[in-house]
Amino acid sequence: MIEARVQVDTRAAGHIIPRTIYGHFIEHLGRSVDEGVWTEQGRGEDLFLGGISRPVLEAIRAIRPGLIRYPGGCFADSYHWQDGVGPREKRPRRKNRMWGRFGKALGPDDHNHFGTDEFLALCREVGAEPMLTVNVGSGTPEEAAAWVEYCNGSDDGYWGGLRAANGWAEPWSVKYWCVGNEMWNPGEFGFCGPATYARRLVRFSQAMREKDPTIRLIAVGAIDPWNWWNRTVLEDGGPHADYLSIHAYHPPLFITNELVRRDRKATADAFYWVLSGTEDFRRILERADKACARFSPPGKPVQIAFDEWNVWYSIRHIVRSNYNLRDGLFAASILNLLQRLADRVPIACLAQLVNVISAIVSDGNNAYLTPIGQAFKLFTENAGERWLPAAVECENIRSGGKQFPALDSSATLETSGERLGLFLVNRHYDRPLSVAIDLQGFDSESTATLELLHHDDPLARNTFAEPERVAVRTEEVKLPPSPRLELPPHSIAALILNRRPAD
Ligand code: AHR
């Protein structure tokens, strides 16, 4: 048995963890909307808003998204929001201008039945903060400003009145708005350099804030080791931005064949090669944070919105993906990282929510959580509002020239100070860990709740036939005075401890 130790000091309670770090993303891409979120299948009374099947809604509710981003992604930079409001039968059917270029499987035609109000009603139903991406690629500042007014304006104005006439009397009060997406990407509508983008950011921001000065804007950032893009955007457009958007996928897109081959072999090396990507994400966020610290306008720190992240092995996973337990471990490590960095990275979105490189798989009617979705469930059900420093001592895993700690951890405390959540990921392929738990300043009750996500097969997946093959199991555990927890190989755990009441 390999020994490890984690020390948590509750007397040093740190930053607030906003629920917006547990975010997700819906894009009009592949079967994400049509046949995914919005199915129109089943009997009328089984459909939320007439289009979202109850199992899909319950699956989304189960992972408690803190925020959902929509309608893209690359799609957003060629989307005109007015196509997706008003009576559904009158909405135009459109070609998917972005993804349709790669065929109907990636970009099916869009009937626009799932649009602004359906998205915002879904967010309200599941308690998620909405985040909308305006079209900077083929759209105008005026179109974006009208969208802000449609969502947030009172019903005595033109666009707010239109929303009310469409059946939504109360303003939606959408706070977060992304000003375009990945403008540095040659495949993006509106592809440009950072100085041009910064000028657009200023124009869009001025028009949008005129309609609602309280909105928070997310500027396009880049994974940018040389700070070339981020520096220009922050220096020229920083006063207009509240957040800098960073996207990262592991492995870096399209360099995937090697992994797909190794993946099939199901070796420890392939397993570790995937998990080593969590260290890449840490470096990416730390680098972006340095750029924000250095180039934000004086007195106005721009923070990071990590609004697309995931493992993504192949372009075909847009059409069909079904993540396994190893991928769940990857996601859990990133959720630990996000809890640790939440004061500098207060927004994050897994890409994506349903059917496309996703947390949830749906066939239109039924739905299940992948191990990535299960990892989200484990965190969002158990995380407290405050981060606690957790010092880990353990051996490093060394594989293929990379190394990273075998045990990954973060800890949280509820605002009341009574409930502590300890999140642990054993990233060993085939070896259990015995973890000594040292709690400073927290006298725990002698029993605790253990939530465990594990399966003997590190590559186990869920299916429609076995939707809970890899699922969180809950048990009560006894805690001796110097507690130890045995973590099976390739497992994720949340240990929930309650403070012993004072005598
Ligand atoms: O999440 C899929 C795509 O990946 C998004 O549209 C884009 O922003 C990113 O490159």
Image (cartoon, grey):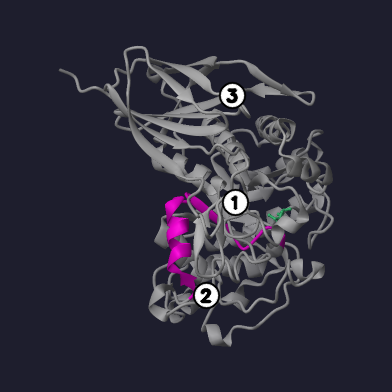
Q: Which mark is residue 217?
A: 1
Extreme residue toward the left, this view: 503
Q: Quadrant of the image for the C terminus?
A: top left
Amino acid at circle 1: Leu
Q: Quadrant of the image for the N terminus?
A: top right
Q: Nearer the viewer, residue 364 or 302?
A: 364
- Badge 2 marks a residue whose secondary structure is helix
Label 3 crowd (10 A; few <14 / some 14-19 / many >=20): some
Q: CA distance from mark 2 to mark 3?
A: 60 Å
Q: Residue 188: where, in percent of width, then height? A: 79, 59
Q: CA distance from mark 2 to mark 1?
A: 20 Å
Mark 2 and mark 3 in contact? Answer it, CB < 8 Å: no
Amino acid at circle 2: Trp
- Badge 3 marks a residue whose secondary structure is loop
Q: Nearer the viewer, residue 411 or 105?
A: 105
- Magenta region: 51-74
Q: Is residue 178 left or right of residue 470?
A: right
Q: Is residue 76 left or right of residue 168?
A: right
Extreme residue toward the top, this view: 482
Residue drawn at x 51%, y 84% is 87
- Badge 1 marks a residue whose secondary structure is strand
First reached walking from the N terminus: tag 1 or tag 3: 1
First reached walking from the N terminus: tag 2 or tag 1: 2
Q: Which mark is residue 431?
A: 3
Q: Residue 263: where, in percent of width, then height? A: 74, 42
Q: Is residue 227 above or below residue 175?
A: above
Verify whether residue 67 appears in magenta.
Answer: yes
Which residue corresponds to mark 2? 159
